[in-house]
């Protein structure tokens, strides 16, 4: 799925980010919690084993805001995945 591909829900976008430094469930929770606070985000699923964070939002997110949220959690946003 591309970074801004539409999902089956009208108006919902799914974006997959790569985050460096997550190693456990606590890491997943910290990243998910920070990203969930961004406006328009309806769900976040972080997987430490793959370093992938899947975000469903009402509109495209500003990558700088996502980066700031990931930084606040103590990890590094690498970017979006294709």
Image: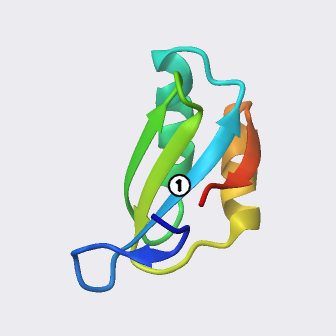
- Residue at 48% of width from left, 40% of height from top? 32
- Identify which residue, 10 or 38, lies in the foreground: 10
Residue 77, picture quadrant? top right
Question: Is residue 39 positioned above or below 51 on the image?
Answer: below
- Residue at 34% of width from left, 76% of height from top? 12
Residue 71, picture quadrant? top right
Q: Which quadrant would the N terminus be assigned to in this image?
A: bottom left
Question: Is residue 56 positioned above or below 70 on the image?
Answer: below
Q: Secondary structure at mark 1?
A: strand
- Residue at 51% of width from left, 75% of height from top? 4
Within-10-Å neighbours for mark 1: few <14, some 14–19, many 20+:
many
Q: Residue 18, image x and y in percent?
A: 64, 44
Q: Which quadrant would the C terminus be assigned to in this image?
A: bottom right
Q: Which residue is mark 1?
A: 16
- How has the structure been colored for display? rainbow
Q: Number of marks in the image? A: 1
Q: Residue 50, image x and y in percent?
A: 54, 29
Q: Residue 2, image x and y in percent?
A: 52, 68
Q: Residue 5, image x and y in percent?
A: 44, 75
Question: Is residue 39 positioned above or below 10 on the image?
Answer: above
Left or right of 49? Residue 12 is left
Left or right of 9? Residue 71 is right
- Identify which residue, 25 or 47, lies in the foreground: 47
Q: Residue furthest bottom?
A: 11
């Amino acid at each position: 799925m591309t970074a801004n591909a539409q999902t089956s829900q009208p108006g919902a976008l799914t974006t997959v980010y790569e985050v460096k430094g997550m190693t456990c469930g606590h890491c997943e929770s910290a990243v998910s919690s920070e990203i969930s606070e961004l406006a328009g985000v309806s769900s976040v699923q972080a997987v430490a084993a793959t370093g992938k964070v899947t975000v469903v939002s009402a509109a495209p997110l500003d990558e700088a805001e996502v980066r700031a949220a990931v930084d606040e959690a103590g990890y590094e946003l690498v970017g979006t995945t294709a």
